[in-house]
């Protein structure tokens, strides 16, 4: 990420502390692997902002770099002037991290005391009055060279990725909602108002394009090799493997031609009855290479999948709230037929015939990717549209390494979720669906900050 650096000043405070802050912050940002923009230190005293005129100077400098930076770090080496800060950043248009320096015991005389602890409230109060969105983190004051600030910086970078990636993106909807699944309904106009552009495609077009593909086309042959290396395809008949490869090639063409950032797919039952395959493993492979794809036309799940992928920079998955785990009320088996990315699995998946389709129509369901979800800390989230609003929740849990019997179909994992039963009640009463989406790592704070402060989603608390 690239951050624009802002340094504040106030006349009667020890301004020489700003020079040291500039060096500290540049080192902290670059040591974390990020880039930075900073106004020339000769433009004002130490390149910092105090007056409204200096704020306007910074504002215009920042405007000249519009589109180059992902967030702003507002550094308060001392109790800074809030009026200059407002003038400088009221049109920043990106997340703003408030950082204030701590004072040191033994350096509390007038020449060294910073008072940034108090000054931070002056800035946040005035930004609140001006309705300029900003981010504050724990601890209240923190030195840029400290491990605590490195964690702040990591979280802020994740927030910036989510905001940048979610503010405007295009989501491809391939196929209509499965008739029986009213649970995944959504309001396309509402989503557009949140910057989510939905491009809809008829599944018949996909099937037609697949049927036009030849077995010996270079793209089909290359895709077949990719799939065979990705999962264990040894049980799948050659004809069905080729069909899966063709579907994957056609989906890639949709992504390229329409500049799709994420997709959702009608995965049954036309693909099974007409093409004699089940696309679970294709969804798995798409997610594993960084292209968010949800199944069952659960478009809203693709939204939270994309947010978590941006935050964690790792694949995500859409899963069913599927089974209790014995009598443990805080554990649940989260499952789907096989769209889970290899990165999230405990081992390489095995491509099988989907048991639900094979039961009534043998030979129609080749493509389910069976296995187990690995053990890791995770975040789960989902959303829906209602009355012009996008409502979303996020919470944290972990996948354990506890076994699920071998006869269990598909790809599942045991999730341990504190206070699960009460959370399930809140999800049910709140109108959330039978799906949740999961990502690696704990990122509830990052998601909620991005959703509520910068993207305008309605965040629903399921914790209490």
Image (tube, helix red, strand yellow):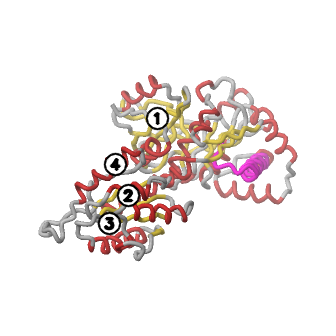
Quadrant in the picture for residue 273: top right
Residue 370 horizontal/vertical position (percent):
59, 43
Mark 2 vs 4, N-terminal side:
2
> Residue at point 46% right, 55% down?
158
- What segment carries the magenta color? 242-263
Pick the front one: 136 or 321: 136
Q: Which mark is residue 458?
A: 1
Q: Nearer the observer, disc 1 or disc 2?
A: 2
Q: Nearer the observer, disc 3 or disc 2?
A: 2
Callout 2–callout 4 Cβ contact below 8 Å: yes
Q: Which residue is mark 3?
A: 144
Residues packed near mark 2 inside 10 Å, few (<14), some (14 to 19) or many (20 plus): many
Callout 3–callout 2 Cβ contact below 8 Å: no
> Residue at point 50% right, 53% down?
93
Residues packed near mark 3 inside 10 Å, few (<14), some (14 to 19) or many (20 plus): many
> Residue at point 34% right, 51% down?
136
Callout 3–callout 1 Cβ contact below 8 Å: no
Q: Which mark is residue 89?
A: none
Q: Which residue is mark 4?
A: 126
């Amino acid at each position: 990420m690239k951050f624009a650096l802002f340094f504040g000043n106030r006349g009667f405070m020890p301004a020489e502390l700003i020079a040291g802050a500039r060096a500290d912050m540049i080192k902290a940002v670059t040591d974390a692997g990020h880039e930075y923009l900073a106004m020339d230190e000769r433009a004002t005293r130490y390149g910092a902002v105090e007056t409204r005129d200096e704020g306007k100077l910074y504002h215009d400098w920042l405007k000249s770099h519009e589109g180059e930076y992902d967030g702003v770090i507002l550094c308060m080496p001392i109790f800074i002037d809030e009026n200059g800060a407002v003038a400088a950043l009221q049109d920043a248009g990106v997340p703003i991290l408030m950082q204030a320096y701590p004072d040191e015991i033994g350096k509390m005389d007038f020449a060294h005391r910073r008072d940034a602890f108090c000054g931070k409230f002056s800035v946040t109060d005035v930004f609140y009055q001006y309705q300029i969105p900003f981010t504050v983190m724990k601890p209240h004051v923190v030195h840029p060279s400290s491990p605590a600030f490195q964690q702040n910086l990591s979280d802020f970078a994740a927030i910036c990725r989510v905001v940048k990636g979610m503010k405007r993106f295009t989501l491809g909807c391939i196929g209509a909602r499965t008739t029986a699944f009213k649970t995944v309904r959504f309001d396309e106009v509402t989503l557009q108002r949140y910057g989510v552009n939905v491009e809809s495609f008829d599944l018949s077009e996909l099937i037609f394009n697949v049927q036009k593909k030849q077995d010996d086309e270079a793209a089909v042959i290359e895709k077949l090799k990719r799939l065979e290396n990705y999962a264990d395809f040894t049980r799948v008949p050659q004809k069905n493997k080729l069909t899966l490869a063709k579907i994957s090639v056609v989906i890639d063409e949709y992504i390229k031609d329409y500049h799709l950032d994420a997709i959702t797919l009608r995965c049954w039952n036309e693909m099974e009855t007409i093409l004699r395959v089940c696309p679970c493993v294709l969804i798995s492979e798409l997610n594993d290479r960084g292209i968010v794809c949800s199944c069952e036309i659960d478009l809203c799940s693709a939204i939270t999948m994309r947010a978590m992928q941006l935050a964690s920079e790792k694949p995500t998955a859409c899963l069913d709230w599927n089974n209790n785990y014995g009598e443990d009320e805080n554990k649940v088996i989260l499952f789907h037929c096989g769209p889970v990315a290899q990165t999230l699995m405990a081992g390489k998946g095995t491509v099988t015939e989907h048991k639900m389709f094979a039961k009534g129509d043998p030979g129609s369901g080749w493509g389910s990717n069976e296995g187990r979800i690995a053990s890791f800390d995770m975040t789960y989230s989902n959303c829906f549209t209602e009355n012009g609003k996008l409502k979303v929740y996020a919470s944290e849990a972990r996948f354990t390494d506890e076994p699920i019997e071998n006869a269990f179909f598909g790809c599942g994992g045991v999730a341990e979720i504190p206070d699960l039963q009460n959370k399930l009640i809140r999800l049910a009463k709140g109108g959330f669906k039978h799906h949740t989406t999961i990502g690696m790592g704990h990122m509830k704070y990052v998601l909620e900050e991005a959703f509520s402060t910068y993207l305008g989603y309605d965040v629903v608390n399921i914790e209490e």
